[in-house]
Image (cartoon, helix red, strand yellow):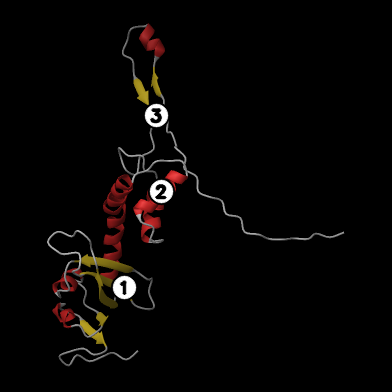
Amino acid sequence: MSTETRNEIAVVPPQVKVIRHVRNVYACRQCEREDIETPIVTAAMPKPVYPGSLASPSSMPYVMSQKYVDSLPLYRQEQHFARLGYTLSRQTMANWMIYGAQKWLMPLVSVMKAYLLRQDALHADETTLQVLREPGKTAQSSSYLWLYRTGSGVSTAVIYDYQKTRGGEHPQIFLSGFKGYLHVDGYAGYHKVPGVTLVGFGHMRGVNTMKR
């Protein structure tokens, strides 16, 4: 007569699997029998994302996104993996993130930075950050995250640059080669950036603001 439909949300928990890559090694048996030179051919093996580790193209970004997107510390991820039936230490995951950032993400950041510096207008700002056990600094002292991003009308790119201080030499170095408009607040450190036109609100030394 008719069809009735009822919807409900189902949650499928993640699964941890060990993927085993097996490759064959081939030799010429006839060559062996005839006692002549025996060629040996080894099948190709998929290239690992982190040589010498168990990291895979799915597990490494999963751990990184859990920490930096979902703010899940590594010790909690360690407990989560244990509940899924697999022992994965926080030290191992920390090594994955360090290697992944240096090997896979930094080249991408370099491309993004080159794209930023080609723009006509950029935004910049800085904010405090507390870092524990940082060499030469107490846990109560402030470090800084400097943010640089594109303006409107172009593809968005955002880069965070970590520095221990709020010195104006940091945007001076990061923005080396940029010659456009730099939209910032009234912090005097941005005046160290050469060849740019500072725009925004409350600038010092009589720099004009740009109306939007």
- Which mark identifies residue 79? 2
Q: Of marks 3 and 1, which one's residue comes earlier in the chain? A: 3
| Residue 102 visible within the image | yes
Label 1 or label 2, whichever lies nearer to me, is 2
The single residue placed furthest to the top in the displayed view is 34
Q: Do the residues labelled 2 and 3 touch (CB within 8 Å)?
A: no
- Residue visible at 39% across and 61% down? 69
Number of numbered tags placed on the structure image: 3
Between 10 and 2, the one nearer to me in the picture? 10
Query: Element type at marker 2?
Result: helix
Q: Could you tell me residue 188's position as x and y percent?
A: 16, 83
Could you classify mark 3 by the number of other residues whose Cα lies within 10 Å: few (under 14), some (14-19), or many (20 or more)? few
Residue type pointed to by label 1: Arg
Could you say which quadrant of the image residue 195 lies in? bottom left
The residue sitting at 22% across, 61% down in the picture is 132
Please rate how many residues cluster around mark 1, counting C-alpha atoms within 10 Å: few if below 14, some from 14 to 19, many from 20. many
Query: Would you place residue 173 above or below residue 83 in this image?
Result: below
Q: Is residue 58 visible in this depiction of the protein?
A: no
Residue at image mark 3: 43
Residue 128 in the image: state x and y as whole percent.
Answer: 24, 72
The disc, 1 or 2, on the residue closer to the chain's N-terminal end is 2
Residue 160 sits above or below residue 84 on the image: below
Give the distance between the C-alpha atoms of the residues marked 3 and 1, in whole angstroms: 46 Å
| Dot 1: element | strand
**Marks 2/3: CA–CA distance:** 38 Å
Dot 2 or dot 3: first in sequence order is 3
**Which label sits on residue 149?**
1
Element marked by disc 3: loop
Position of the N terminus, as image quadrant, is bottom right
Camera-near label (2 vs 3) is 2
In the displayed structure, 194 sits above or below 136; it is below
Badge 2, how many Cα within 10 Å: few under 14, some, many 20+?
Answer: some
